[in-house]
Amino acid sequence: MEYRYLGRTGLKVSTICLGTMQFGWTTDEAQAFEVMTRAVALGCNFFDTADVYSRWAEGNPGGVSEEIIGRWLAQGVVRRQDIILATKVRGAMSDAETDQGLSRHHIMAAVDGSLRRLQTDYIDLYQVHWPDTDTPLEETLRALDDLVRAGKVRYIGCSNYPAWLLAKALWISDVRSLARFDSLQPHYNLVYRAEFERELQPLCLDQGIGVIPYSPLAGGFLTGKYRPGQPMPDSARAAGVQRRYMNDTGYAAVAKLEQVGLLHEATVAQTAIAWVLANPAVTSAIIGANDVAQLEETGKGALVRLSDAEKTALDEATAWH
């Protein structure tokens, strides 16, 4: 496993980040424990979750993914200090008006809830899940800065932020001497590029922001299991994949991934991961896995090294300029 610095920080994380959104949703606790234990054995030291995972599932109150991780950590499979644990705040944790958003009130309550569920006394990377236009950005940053100073949080990051808002946040942190966002979690993959590459990528490179893309396999589309004229896979994400990616450009991307992958004896999914990690702005790619076999198969993408010509060929397959 390769390790990279998270932006300009001295924190090293594995190039594969284990996403845990599926824990308590499509992956039960026993399977989740197996996946996390195997991830560590493979050299993955970076886990990502969120307090709202998976509140959308029937009968799930939210916080379940964090609780599963917490119970796994309590088993002592790995030392707490050897895992870089990332979680997020923003979403509604109940129907109460104050139990959501990025106000000081909610952040202070939410971090304690996450710490309790994760059974830890600190969070390595605390991320705002998406913007809150109803709360002043300075209020959010001051609350996060207080958490860093209190030792509850080591680093802070953001997710789903547009470039102008990330730049504004960096400016506020600079002039107010507050902890700044050291990472960005964008939606980014071979068939969803422009939103990140147009403005966010140059900003992150210039400002030393670590980039942790989610959905590098486009919800499963870039595994090759979605093919023209074939029945839809039995998947919880199939409808969203069909709406967003099943078009001429998407199918052309899969075909090119398959072609390039053959040169490395790699699958479509592994080649898609390799393409994301070949971007100099990217620190680590978030992958989810319902079982150990899926983790091992997809994670091999971190071992594939694309040539400049191969990356260019893949770039051209989905060029957005």
Image: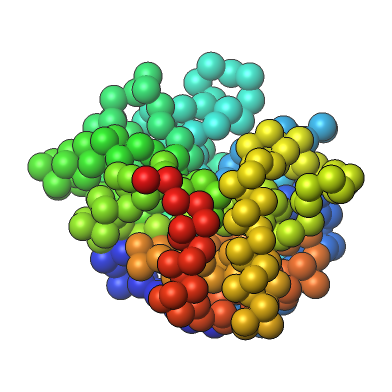
Q: Nearer the viewer, residue 225 or 60?
A: 225
Q: Position of residue 252 (x, y in %)?
A: 62, 54
Name the side, left or right, on which 87 lies relative to 243. left
- Which part of the image, by quadrant, shows the N terminus? bottom right
For the point 63% across and 25% down, the residue is 94
Q: Position of residue 51 (x, y in %)?
A: 59, 42
For the point 62% across and 65% down, the residue is 257
Name the side, left or right, on which 170 lies relative to 294. left
Number of labelled discs? Answer: 0
Residue 71 is at least partly visible in this image: no
For the point 54% across and 71% down, the residue is 274
Q: Position of residue 6 (x, y in %)?
A: 36, 66
307 over 217 or under it: above or below: below
- Which part of the image, by quadrant, shows the C terminus? top left
For the point 76% across and 35% down, the residue is 239
Query: Hey, which quadrant is residue 68 in on the image?
Result: bottom right
* The residue positioned farthest toward the top in the image shown: 97
90 over 63 or under it: above or below: above
Query: Hey, which quadrant is residue 107 in on the image?
Result: top left
209 over 199 or under it: above or below: below
Name the side, left or right, on which 99 lies relative to 268. left
How are the colours assigned in the image? rainbow
Residue 222 is at least partly visible in this image: yes
Q: Position of residue 38 (x, y in %)?
A: 72, 76
Q: Nearer the viewer, residue 155 or 122?
A: 155
Q: Nearer the viewer, residue 102 or 227?
A: 227
